[in-house]
Amino acid sequence: MVAATIGKRLSQINVENIEENRRAYRELLFSCGADLKEHVSGVILFHETIYQKASTGQTMVEILKSHGIIPGIKVDTGTVPLAGTDGECTTQGTYALSSSRFC
């Protein structure tokens, strides 16, 4: 699974898109201080982030919860161009969410 969105953020600051750099970037964002909870109530996490630990040993989820922020998980697999449109996209991977096996 490719971490494309964070890869775009890292490339803008000339940082290589590798797991350690993604972890450090997320740790920086999630640990930026008490004011974070005043502006953020929930965060949608990429699959990789659920299992990552900060340099303190806390998981990213634990850090968010300690600030009163609700962690969620990204369930789609990204977007692709929608055929027959002028640059519109459609989300892929959500079809499994409506499957009867999940009900």
Image (spheres, helix red, strand yellow):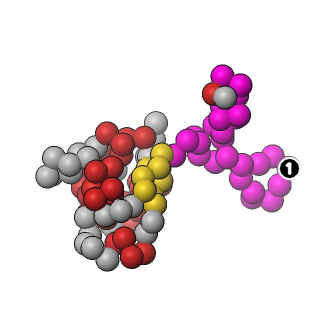
- Asked whether 65 or 43 is in front, the reply is 65
Which residue is at 65% across, 35% downward?
Answer: 97
- View extreme (right): residue: 84
Q: Which residue is mark 1?
A: 84
Q: Position of residue 37 (x, y in %)?
A: 36, 71
Inspect the image, locate mark 1, and give the three-letter code of the amino acid beneath it: Gly
Where disc 1 sits, the SS reads loop
Dot 1 crowding, Cα within 10 Å, few <14, some 14–19, many 20+: few
Report the number of numbered marks.
Answer: 1
Looking at the image, residue 90 sits to the left or right of residue 5; the answer is right
- The range drawn in magenta is 74-101
**Res. 78 in view:** yes
Q: Position of residue 87 (x, y in %)?
A: 75, 58
**In percent of the image, x 42 and y 75: which residue is there?**
39
Does residue 30 appear in the picture of this structure? no
Q: Residue furthest top?
A: 101
Task: Give whichever of 47, 101 is nearer the camera.
Answer: 101
Q: Residue at x 31, y 77 (%)?
A: 35
Asked if the magenta segment contains residue 80, the reply would be yes
Q: Nearer the viewer, residue 48 or 5?
A: 48
Q: Quadrant of residue 47?
A: top left
Q: Name the residue at the left extreme.
A: 56
From the viewer's perspective, tell me whether residue 83 is left or right of residue 70.
Answer: right
From the viewer's perspective, tell me whether residue 1 is left or right of residue 84.
left
71 in the magenta segment? no
Q: Position of residue 93 (x, y in %)?
A: 63, 37
Q: Identify the residue shown where x is 36% and y is 46%.
A: 49
Q: Is 67 situated above or below 90? A: below
> On the image, which quarter does residue 7 sit in?
bottom left
Task: Assign the C terminus to one quadrant of the image.
Answer: top right
The image shows residue 41 at horizontal and vertical percentages of: 45, 66
